[in-house]
């Protein structure tokens, strides 16, 4: 990995796409986060969430991965705890241990969610999502409710048999005023307690209101653009607003627990665990408290390179590793999408819509379904 910083690792597309945004600053050191986790082990042990004896081992394993990639620790310090849930270990053994680490054909039919992100970003993204959903290759679409094209085709999306959710956004302004920061800066400010809670809450309210205006109903689920919904402060304010607004009719939440990433290399494995380590366990606990459903694990993590050949290879492995209730995210677009990921978005669209995809689903024993339907997952 040539790029430094958690934000750059999570999203390999260029940061600060809005011209007025400054370049990204330093982000918290992964090992500083692990150190703060050590300080919290008595509370976490009482919650029976992460056994205390895992902490030292996780720091050693993270250091080995860090050294192997030639990265240097980034300056930063962890913040205070938020209900003792601020930092997350990157250990996903409790998820990986229940799957086929080496891949292979499923012996039982598995229903998973295939979720396309970024509806509302531009017409090319919207067109690809509508086409794939009509083809039965998607079962969920996440909407940037204040995005440039969000108001153009919501009726067409609503007419399709898929779950539709809010893609909570704190990193791309699209020319709007509000709290929008480069991902690395957002992570740092979330973990150092510098995000203003009232502003965060207002932005969540505005995006949920926009969804309800566009679709005339509550969202089926909520997730985050660049996974921001799981970050401290944002997570807390989101859960509080969901409880206030939706009560018993709670949308489901997208969980970022890492899948095994078999066959995709240590870089993809590490990236998936960094994403999960930024809030997956805390989000899961919060979801349980408000009785919100969630997917089992997140598939679809890679470095947004490789063209059609690379994406074809990755999809086959994700399907082979899939288990009931998993979610595979994707970022398709029609050719010539006006963003930094245009070529890879088009590659995803081509692969997901291909005849090969149907064969891989059958070969892997996987069906695409809605989490509100056949892909529902009951956490242990």
Image (tube, rainbow, N blue to C red):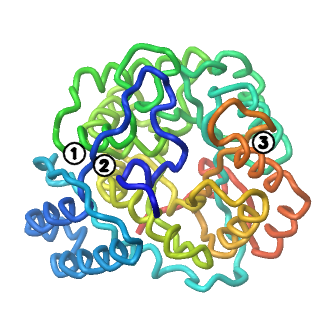
Spatial CA span between label 2 and label 3: 30 Å
Which of pointers 2 and 3 indicates the residue nearer the eye? 3
Q: Quadrant of the C terminus?
A: bottom left
| Pointer 1 or 3: first along the chain | 3
**Observer-nearest of 94 and 91:** 91
- Which label sits on residue 133? 3
Identify which residue, 42 or 225, lies in the foreground: 225
| Residue wearing tag 2 | 286
Find disc 1 in the rendering and name its residue: 191
Asked whether residue 258 appears in the rendered view, the answer is yes
Q: CA distance from mark 1 to mark 2?
A: 17 Å
Helix, strand, or loop for circle 3? Answer: helix
| Mark 2 residue crowding within 10 angstroms, few (<14) / some (14–19) / many (20+) | many
Which residue is at 39% across, 40% downward? 183
Horizontal side of 284 relative to 367 (left or right) equals left
The residue carrying pointer 1 sits among few (fewer than 14), some (14 to 19) or many (20 or more) residues within 10 Å by Cα, namely: many
Please provide percent x and percent y for residue 78: 16, 52
Residue 361 in picture, x, y percent from top left: 79, 67
């Amino acid at each position: 990995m040539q790029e430094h910083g958690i934000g750059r690792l999570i999203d390999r597309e260029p940061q600060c796409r809005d011209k007025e945004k400054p370049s990204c600053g330093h982000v918290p050191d992964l090992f500083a986060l692990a150190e703060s986790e050590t300080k919290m082990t008595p509370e976490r042990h009482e919650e029976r969430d992460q056994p205390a004896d895992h902490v030292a081992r996780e720091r050693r394993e993270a250091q080995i991965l860090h050294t192997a990639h030639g990265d240097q620790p980034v300056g930063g310090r962890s913040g205070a705890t938020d209900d003792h849930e601020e930092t997350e270990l990157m250990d996903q053994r409790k998820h990986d241990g229940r799957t086929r680490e080496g891949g292979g054909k499923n012996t039982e039919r598995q229903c998973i969610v295939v979720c396309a992100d970024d509806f509302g970003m531009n017409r090319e993204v919207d067109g690809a999502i509508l086409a794939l959903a009509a083809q039965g290759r998607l079962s969920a679409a996440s909407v940037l409710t204040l995005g440039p094209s969000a108001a153009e085709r919501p009726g067409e999306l609503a007419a399709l048999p898929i779950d539709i959710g809010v893609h909570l956004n704190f990193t791309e302004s699209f020319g709007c005023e509000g709290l929008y920061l480069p991902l690395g800066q957002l992570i740092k400010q979330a973990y150092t307690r510098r995000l203003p809670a009232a502003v965060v809450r207002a932005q969540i309210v505005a995006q949920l209101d926009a969804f309800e205006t566009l679709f005339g109903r509550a969202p089926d689920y909520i997730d985050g653009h660049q996974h921001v919904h799981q970050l401290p402060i944002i997570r807390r304010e989101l859960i509080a607003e969901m409880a206030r607004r939706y009560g018993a009719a709670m949308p489901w939440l997208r969980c970022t627990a890492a899948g095994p990433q078999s066959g995709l290399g240590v870089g993809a494995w590490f990236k998936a665990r960094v994403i999960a380590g930024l809030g997956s366990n805390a989000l899961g606990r919060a979801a349980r408290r408000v009785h919100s459903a969630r997917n089992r694990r997140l598939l679809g993590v890679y470095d947004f390179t490789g063209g059609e050949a690379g994406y074809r290879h990755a999809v086959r492995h994700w399907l082979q590793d899939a288990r009931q209730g998993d979610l595979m995210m994707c970022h398709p677009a029609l050719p010539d999408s006006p963003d930094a990921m245009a070529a890879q978005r088009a590659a995803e669209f081509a692969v997901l819509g291909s005849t090969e995809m149907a064969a891989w689903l059958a070969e892997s024993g996987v069906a695409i379904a809605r989490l509100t339907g056949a892909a529902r997952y009951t956490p242990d």
